[in-house]
Image (cartoon, coloured by chain):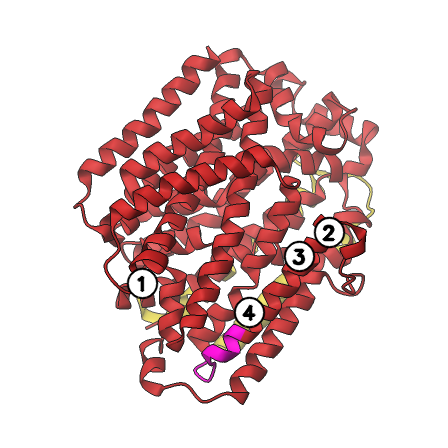
Amino acid sequence: MMRWLLVVAVFVLMFLHNDFWNRDHEPRAVFGWVPWDLAYHVAWVGAGALLLAVVMRVAWGRSS
Amino acid sequence: MIWAIIASYVALVVGIGAWSSRRGTGTAEDYFLAGRSLGTVVLFMALFGTNVTAFGMLGFPGFAYREGVGVFGFFGASAAFVSPLLFILLGYPIWNIGKRNRFVTQAQMFRSRWDSRGVGVVLTVFPILYTFLYMGAGVIGGALAISEFAGIAYPFAALTVTGTAFVYTSLGGMRGTAWTNVLQAGLFLVFLVVAAAWIANALGGPSHLHQRLVTEAPQLLSQRDEGVLAPASWAFGFLLGPASVIAFPHMFHRLLAARNVKALRRSIHLYPWALILLFVPVTMLGLWGALEFPDLSGKATERVLPLLMLKHLPEWLAGIGLVAILAAVMSSLDAQLLTLSTIFAVDVFARGGRPSRWVGRIVLLVLAAVALAIALWQPATIVGISLYAFGGYTLLIPIFVAGFFWPRSTGKGVIVASVVGHGLWTAYHAGKFLGPAWDLDLPSPILPPIVWCLLIECGLLVGGSLLTRRPDSERVERFARPFA
């Protein structure tokens, strides 16, 4: 069950990577200088890093 | 001053190679795989340094200059998630089964999995072809940058890059290249962060630069709907580059050198953050370069980082920047040279016997000469060569997946699928290289060509395996429980 949930989570994350809703928006910035698109994908990588930790724990089992 | 910095760098990496050669036990496994003893820091820096080429330092800022901030999501973020994900799912089985059976190369591992000499040939020929070309592309990129930046002749720059990498790789083998990668990866990461901060400060600060981007080049602050970043290309972009990393023979080789599962786990945890540390500065530098040098076009956009360095950094820091570019080129080149020499020593010359490190060293010299010849020949654009090689590596992944996770797969299925898949991909690129009359018209508007090749390859692998005799269960058992 957990493995299937992780497969779904990976697909959801890959879908969120295709952020068509961020196309053609007015220029915005985080902290006054980080372009919104860059900030979105850095946050996406952060979420990905957490997911990777869970995938590793489940796939590698006790060896991790 | 620039020459003094370059000379110091060359002396340092050669010194590390010589120091490493004294620390080794003198066996072939120690030379080719550092005795499978790399701990977390060295393993991580070796994997990361091997992965980052001149594209990261020169190509990517140019990419951001042309296409805008979207390139970070398209390539950087994608690489920061997909590459480590495949390290988890395939890298651990590669390390685990490689250690269990003392495998040294891809061909050795999968030839044994299916007891098939044909699979061994497939996994020798195609990786050698792609790695030769990819290695040549790296040398071309690095030599072009150095010749332009330092004002020296291109052939001399190419000779400096390949000659230095040959000397320290030959001396130190895997241990030497891994330790030089610690220096090299550390150097280009620290330089990029410092250079981005320095240049932003020199240009009035990051907030001021953002305001300038909003008024002068707002199109660079959002994703484009056409070209490389168009939605269809974006959706499958991870297949060329981020996904192919796990199948690079030189990354495969590095993974086999991990000391234990702890080193592997920690390296994978560090990977996404190191890629952010690399790709955020180069993206921002590309955008800021578009404000400073708005008239660059085509290949000239890849000069944006050196131009910013020359204009805004003090001479000593610009000199370190040049060495950082050299480091990015050499940290991949050394791994490629070592891996190719291992493939020749183990799969071509030893053929099941004990490989000789001296054969490896002699082959290394020949390979360095071939890399130099490719760099002097410059057969196609760096991007064109790299895309062909990346796609080819991606087409190796179904073999790994079948080998580890599908006991019913057969050697014959793998051979048919690989020959057709790689043949189709090669024909597609050869058509582009030879001219319009030879252009293979794959239905790329619907799906990118690499997706078609992968689908055909996977279909043939499944069909070919089901139509051929079930493999020997004792042999399958050696590859069972890849995560155990």
What crowding class fits label 1: few (fewer than 14 Cα within 10 Å), some (14-19), or many (20 or more)? few
Q: Amino acid at mark 3?
A: His
Given contact means CB atoms under 8 Å apart, are the residues at marks 3 and 2 in contact? no
Q: Amino acid at mark 1?
A: Arg
> Please, what secondary structure does the residue beneath circle 4 have?
helix
Residue at mark 3: A17
Residue at mark 4: B418
The furthest residue to the top: B1
Residue at left offset 63%, top offset 58%? B426
What crowding class fits label 3: few (fewer than 14 Cα within 10 Å), some (14-19), or many (20 or more)? some
The answer to whether residue B233 is visible is: yes
Q: Position of residue B215 (x, y in %)?
A: 83, 28
The chain painted red is B
Residue B246 as seen in the image, left or right of residue B263 = right
Residue at mark 2: B432
Residue at left offset 33%, top offset 34%? B168
The answer to whether residue B196 is visible is: no
Q: Nearer the viewer, mark 4 or mark 1?
A: 1
Q: Which mark is residue B428?
A: none
Quadrant occupied by the C terminus of chain B? bottom left
Q: Nearer the viewer, residue B234 or B428?
A: B428
Q: How many marks?
A: 4
Q: What chain does mark 3 sit on? A: A
Residue at mark 1: B351
Q: What chain does mark 1 sit on? A: B
Q: Is residue B209 above or below residue B457?
A: above
Q: Is residue B442 magenta?
A: no
What's the magenta region?
Answer: B406-415
Q: Amino acid at mark 2?
A: Lys
Residue at left offset 60%, top offset 78%? B460
**Whole-Å distance between the Cαs marked 3 and 1?**
45 Å
Q: Colour of chain A?
A: yellow
